[in-house]
Image: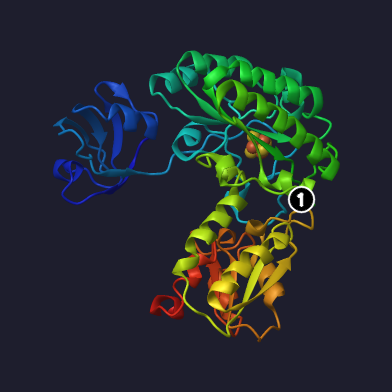
Amino acid sequence: MVRVSKVEAESIAAELGIVPGTELLSVNGRELADFLDWEFLGADEELVIEARLPDGETVVYEVERPEDEPFGVELEPPTVRRCANRCEFCFIEGLPKGLRKNLYVRDDDYRLSFAYGNFATLSNLKDRDIARIIEYRLSPLYVSVHATPWEARKVLLNNPRVPNVVDQLARLKAGGIQYHSQMVIVPGLNDGDVLEQSFTDLWNLGDAVLSVAIVPVGTTQFSHLYTGKAMDAPNATRLLEVVERWEARALAERGDRWVFASDELYLLAGRELPGVEHYGNFEQIENGVGAVTSLRQRVAEGLDMLPRLDGKRIAVVTGISMAPLMPDLLAQIADRTGAAFEVVPTTNSLFGVTVTTAGLLVGADIRRALGGRTDFDMALIPAETINDAGLFLDDESFVAVRESFPFPVYPSYDFIDVLSLEGEPSLQAA
Ligand code: SF4
């Protein structure tokens, strides 16, 4: 169902009398199943739109729309396609009980893969979906491949009915679709020969595969499905060697790195992270590929924007994995501003000590990290820990946490975002 949630004033839709709650039924004789149909079929300049108004009346609108003039509606969010897998390493299976409901939604939806860059396994893809992807040119997609050998993939995804992903990718390639891919590596299940075969199969798909991200498995204290071995320093080192061998081949034969290891893999292996030139357009940054390098770049570029902050004492709360990287970064900011920084490495009380990412710290962790301290002028916490509604993953509100301290606390992505505003009224009021 495609239902209007908002109508822009003075838009074509408003002039037609479309109101929030109107169902859009068909465009030019083709039924609308979801937002993709509307987006693609509704892009024509001449439209015959069948709609049902909230009072039940069915109306047919004939519209000639000037090129580039938006129709003027926003749609209700789509019903998300649920995942049919139970992956070994599924983070959602590793969540504790009692969190807010939407955190437990396991989506696996090619439409969101195209629209928002969410990774999808394509396990629930039907023939008609593939036809639709090709017709609407939903490219690039973001595909969780994990392993190409069929049997290995069934085990990893805990799903005996998972289709052969190489066949699926080949059909998409034949239809002109490209994709970024990722493999979450579980030692003993999809490293070694399975990984080698996976690289070979993806390589043979040619320029349809835009990039491959290699991400080490991460488990929480609640990951009850996990049967693999731990991802430790020797495993991470071996994986990086394989990645670098394929990277060298890709650079030599195609002039492109093609495969990227996530930051965590370098950190686990105790290796220095590559520089900015390594990551190109940072295509897989949402996957933790190049995030630290990007942060370093933003800090270096933002130093000139910072005011003097002489005498200020600033706490920086972060996760255990990022803490060793902080002193170098903060030294540059201290040099420039005169402020004194204290890194406060913090363990994760909700997911357990194996989860060391700064962005997954919860409200209780921030309270614990800064509790009892009165000697700061300001504290910066990872902005990724707070959602659009101002909540941490443990449902603590940022406002409540902030108000429990005698100094201001700011969510920050890269320090520059907050410190460059120091002294501005909007910041002082926060
Ligand atoms: S595809 Fe796997 S990791 Fe993703 S939600 Fe489903 S079970 Fe979890």
At which x and y percent is residue 325? 69, 60
Q: How many marks?
A: 1
Label 1 near ligand 1 (CB < 8 Å): no
Residue 4 as seen in the image, left or right of residue 389: left
Q: Quadrant of ligand 1?
A: top right
What residue sits right under mark 1 in the picture?
A: 220
Up/down of 176 relative to 159, above or below: above
- Label 1: which secondary element: loop
At which x and y percent is residue 378? 57, 79
Up/down of 388 relative to 206, above or below: below
Residue 207 as seen in the image, left or right of residue 326: left
- Image quarter of the N terminus: top left
Identified at 23% across, 40% down, the residue is 70
Residue type marked 1: Thr
Identified at 31% across, 37% down, the residue is 23
The 10 Å Cα crowd at callout 1, few under 14, some 14 to 19, many 20 or more, is: many
Residue 387 at least partly seen: no
At which x and y percent is residue 166? 63, 17
Identified at 80% across, 44% down, the residue is 224
At which x and y percent is residue 406? 59, 85
Q: Quadrant location of residue 245?
A: top right
Residue 409 as seen in the image, left or right of residue 149: left
